[in-house]
Image (cartoon, rainbow, N blue to C red):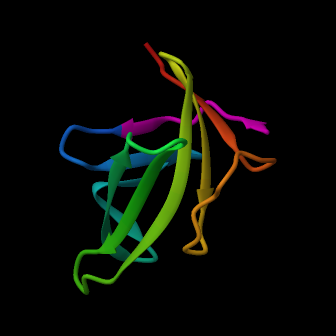
Amino acid sequence: MVFWVLPTTFDNNGYAAFEINGEVMGGKEFYIKGQKGKMTYTINYDTNPIEVDFTITKIQSGESNKILGIAEFTDVDTFIFDLSFNNERPTAFGDNSITLNRVK
C-alpha cells in the first residue's frame, strides 16, 4: 500500500482536483494535453467499499473518460483509495492503494 499526502479537493459543486508535482489536474477548468478540461466526481456511499468515480471531460469536444474507484474511511480524517483506469472498478484494496489524510 502506498502512503501519499496528495493535495486533493472535492468541492460541493461536484468538481474534484488533485495537485501532483505542483500542477493541478481537475476542477472546473484545467488543461490536459493542451485542451481545456474539467473533472467531476460522484460518490456512492450505499456500497461497501464506497464507490468513487471521476469523470474527466474535454470541454470543447465533450469527450470524456471515467476513472472508477473505491474508498474506505479508516477514521474521520483518513481514507484509503484505489483507482482503475481501465473501466473496471477495483474490488479490493491492494499494492496500488493510496492513503489520503485531511489537512486541517
User: Is residue 22 at least partly visible in the picture?
Assistant: no
Q: Position of residue 52 (x, y in %)?
A: 44, 50
- The answer to which image quadrant residue 2 occupies is top right
Q: Nearer the viewer, residue 64 or 24?
A: 64
Is 39 magenta? The answer is no
- Residue in the picture at 39% in, 48% down: 17
Please identify the quadrant where the C terminus is shown. top left
- Residue in the picture at 67% in, 40% down: 98
User: Is residue 7 at least partly visible in the picture?
Assistant: yes
Q: Position of residue 61 (x, y in %)?
A: 25, 87
Please identify the quadrant where the N terminus is shown. top right
Q: Nearer the viewer, residue 99 or 31?
A: 99
Q: 17 above or below 58?
A: above
Q: Position of residue 92 (x, y in %)?
A: 69, 49
Q: Is residue 20 left or right of residue 104?
A: right
Q: Residue furthest top?
A: 104
Q: Nearer the viewer, residue 43 or 21?
A: 43
Q: Is residue 51 left or right of residue 74?
A: left
- How many numbered callouts? 0
- Residue in the picture at 33% in, 52% down: 42
Q: Is residue 91 left or right of residue 33?
A: right
Q: 60 above or below 92?
A: below
Q: Residue furthest bottom?
A: 61
- The answer to which image quadrant residue 84 occupies is bottom right
Q: 93 above or below 89?
A: above
Q: 101 above or below 22?
A: above
State the extent of the magenta-drawn residues as a range. 1-9
Q: Nearer the viewer, residue 31 or 67?
A: 67
- Residue in the picture at 56% in, 34% down: 72
Q: Is residue 18 left or right of residue 96?
A: left
